Amino acid sequence: MQYNNRFLVIGEVYTDVHLHAKSDGKSILRLGGVFHSARSFDALNQAYALATVSPSYINESVSKYANELSAVEYFHIGEINNCPNIILISDSVEAGDQGYNDILREQSTASINISELEKALEKFKPTDIILYPGKYPLSSIYQTLGKTNCRVHVDFQYGKLELEMLITNGIILETFILSTSAEYFKEECNKEPSLLVEKIESKYAKTILLKENRGGSRLYIHNEMKWIAAPSFPVVTQHSVGVGDCYNSVFLSTKHMQDNIQFALKQASYSASLYASTWMHDDFKEIMNFLPDEEELLLLNGIELPWDERSRKHIYIAAPDFPDVDTTWIDYVCNALTYHNFIPRRPVKENGIIRGNEPESQQLQAYDKDIKLLNECSILIAVLLNDDPGTYVEIGWMAKFGKPTILFDPYHRSYNLFLRKTVSKICYTLGEVVDAVFQLITKGEEQVGE
């Protein structure tokens, strides 16, 4: 596939440190920030250049790696001081909040060399600009971009929004990009896509790209007043860091080459899943050579579970959720489900503890409440912490009615044959649990629709 447009990527360079993702016994470390888009463009054979904001101490590494990734040009347009731009990442697969820690970010100061940005625009002559706001000032950058004829796409996942600054400088964004994990979506839009559309009016952007993690993605087109959606494609996830940047790069490259928005969204989603499946750029680049063609990809099914529909999916947590038990894993599961906008239900927390010495009427009332709660839930997750009879009975109850059941076995204790054959899926990590929830709920809805 031949990409004729030229992208200038503006943003920070970070050193990503994945604390719990091990490779040969060591934590994984690699250049991040704009380099996630750079890897994607390199794999696409898309012409691009980098305009970076970073501490000078990594300039030699940045220049070397930009050259290895086939960047046409590299420009250092801004300096980060008093901060190493090192990100510690505690949850690489994004089962829940990834736990980013931008070291010493509070004392960071940044300056922009606008003449270097002007040089980049003049020398590289981009058709498109992808801007990733961060800790650096945007005012002079917006002023400069407002004087160009380039299509401007901004990913507002991090950094300040400053929408009025766009209008002041005569910029109408080609694409306003956000994900459901962004603070702006969660706090200013109350986690509602409809409110996002109301706030990001056509005077700010022509389209809104909303990435919904494992549940798919969608693009809102203002002049048509409609959403176009695409699924995600499940893989064995090695990491989720920079996957959204890969999505941006592939979608924008494909969108401006073809008129088929649906295909561009699906191609971006498929490519992003490949990016998440490996740490090795050479492997990613190799498998990107075998992308499905348009006809094949449009027929390919994936997981489509929009953000606003997930809050209607209540998930029963079967576990010994008692004061004398370490419930850390239960907390992890519930926090991860909440992060993805599902509703975890903890029967012991909601209906209280029955110790066996209560009056029969009280015990029966608690039992009826638990049965009612089981019937209200779409799916069950059993957290196997010990040999708890109640957990086994609840698994059987849900299985009897054909509802999906996930056994989360963090300590590898599920030896019983009847238990293993009754549940829909056995998972050993939190990431596997989250993946299974998306897959089983989507599968259940497809069966209902048949």
Image: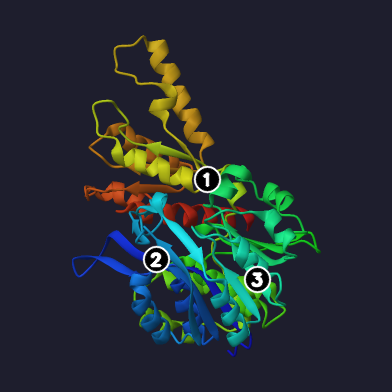
Residue carrying label 2: 14
**Considering only order in the chain, which callout, 3 or 2, is on the residue closer to the N terminus?**
2
Mark in the foreground, 3 or 1 = 3
Question: Which quadrant, please, contains the C terminus?
Answer: bottom right
- In space, the residues marked 2 and 1 are separated at their CA atoms by 29 Å
Q: Nearer the viewer, residue 164 or 155?
A: 164
For this orientation, the residue located farthest to the left is 25
- CA gap between label 3 and label 1 equals 39 Å
Badge 1, how many Cα within 10 Å: few under 14, some, many 20+?
many
Instruction: State whether residue 233 appears in this view.
Output: no
Give the image quarter of residue 390.
top left
Q: Secondary structure at mark 3?
A: helix
Q: Are the residues flagged by discs 2 and 1 in contact, CB closer than 8 Å?
A: no
Judging from the image, the colouring scheme is: rainbow
Q: Quadrant of residue 311?
A: top right
Marks 2 and 3, how far apart at CA: 24 Å
In the picture of the structure, the residue carrying the numbered disc 3 is 144
Residue type indicated by callout 2:
Tyr
**Depth check: 167 or 152 in front?**
167
4 w.r.t. 139: above or below = below
Q: Amino acid at mark 3?
A: Thr
Which circle's residue, 3 or 1, is located before the other in the chain?
3
Question: In the rendered image of this protein, does residue 168 appear above or below residue 9?
Answer: above
